[in-house]
Amino acid sequence: MAIATFAAGCFWGVEQRFGELPGVLSTEVGYTGGTTAHPTYRQVCAHGTGHAEAVRLEYDPERVGYDQLLDAFFSMHDPTTPDRQGPDVGSQYRSAIFYHTPEQERAAREVVARLEAEGRFGAPIVTQIVPAGDFWRAEEYHQRYLEKRGRWGCAI
């Protein structure tokens, strides 16, 4: 099994999309890339911690390759908008790949270079590619939020 961590805007939808991929065994949402230990959602949203809303996933590389995860990542958000995804604005919504191994870093940089060369997005890709650091699990009500909302028919 392997671990991957991505930030692509609000973590609710990102978690759901990654969770639907065959070979992704588990997902959890949380905060990474900042300076405050054990941040809360409120602190992250106040823009004082430097964290991004992120999804950490465990996957089976025999069933889904890291390149496939990267393709999914780039298909689920706009990697050309700094600190913004749709109506969500702030550094916590930045596009970032938090790599866990040198192989993940190399693959991420190669995919970005390929996408830039293809001109796929029509603007420069601003996705950060940075080493994975501490990952602070978000509050329980954020975990699998959209799945819970759909099952219960209302927001929690």
Image: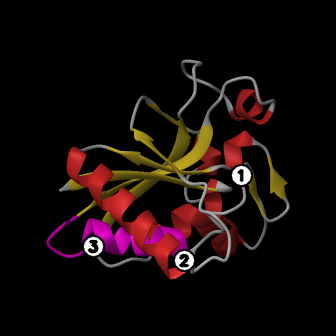
Q: Residues within 10 Å of mark 3 (few under 14, many from 20)?
A: some
Quarter of the image where the C terminus is located: bottom right
Q: Quickly name the residue at label 2.
A: 75
Mark nearer the N terminus (3 vs 1): 3
Check the image and report above or below for 122 versus 85.
below
Q: Quickly name the residue at label 1.
A: 82
| Identity of the residue drawn at 57% across and 27% down | 34
Res. 51 mark? none
Say if the magenta span includes residue 65: yes
Check the image and report above or below for 37 versus 128.
above
Quarter where residue 50 is shown: top right
* Residue 156 visible in the shown view: no
Region in magenta:
60-75
How far across and down, in percent of the image, does residue 20 sit?
A: 44, 76
Say what amino acid the circle numbered 3 marks: Gly
| Identity of the residue drawn at 71% across and 52% down | 82
| Nearer mark to the viewer, of 1 and 2 | 1
Closest to the observer, 127 or 49: 127
How far across and down, in percent of the image, does residue 122 sit?
A: 67, 77
| Left or right: residue 156 compared with residue 104 | right
Query: Mark 3 falls on what kind of element?
Result: loop
- Residues at badges 2 and 3 in contact (C-beta under 8 Å)? no
